[in-house]
Image (cartoon, rainbow, N blue to C red):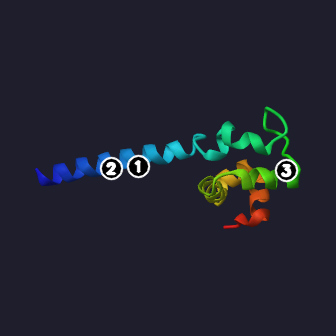
Amino acid sequence: MNIKMLCMGAMALTMMSGAALAGSSTGTSALDDPAKMTPFFTDAEMKTMKPAEEFRVAWLAMKEEDRAGMTKECGDEAIAKEHDEFCKMTKQLGGAN
């Protein structure tokens, strides 16, 4: 009976952690949040970045915790690849990981 309970617990833990990991790769990043990203782009489709000085002003206008979270997300290779230009700009502003 104990082995059965251990196996069921391990299975439940595996399923929960798998769901959590899947959520992080399906666009739940702060870098995919239009409300947070709009200040850095010139267009509604968020395809064209603002010039460096305007980017810096928008970056510094954010809360420190938001900047830290975005910088951390840029440290993830998959996210950084998807948001390459944005992550390069954050690193230039001292957000290198």
Secondary structure beneath disc 1? helix
Secondary structure beneath disc 3? helix
92 to 86, vertically: above or below: below
Of residue 33 and residue 11, the one placed in the foreground of this image is: 33
Do labels 2 and 1 touch, CB within 8 Å? yes
Of residue 39 and residue 43, the one placed in the foreground of this image is: 39
Query: Looking at numbered disc 3 in the image, what kind of residue is underneath it?
Result: Glu
Residue beneath label 3, please?
54
Observer-side mark, 3 or 1, equals 3
Tell whether 79 sits left or right of 51: left
Q: On residue 13, which mark appears?
A: 2
Tell whether 78 sits left or right of 47: left
Q: On residue 74, which mark appears?
A: none
Query: Looking at numbered disc 1 in the image, what kind of residue is underneath it?
Result: Ser
The residue at 61%/40% (across/down) is 27
The x, y position of residue 34, in whole percent, is 68, 37
- How far apart are the alpha carbons under marks 2 and 1? 6 Å
73 to 30, vertically: above or below: below
- How far apart are the alpha carbons under marks 3 and 2? 45 Å
Instruction: For label 3, count other residues whose C-alpha is less than 10 Å away and answer few (under 14), some (14-19) or many (20+).
Output: some
- Quarter of the image that includes the C terminus: bottom right
Residue beneath label 1, please?
17
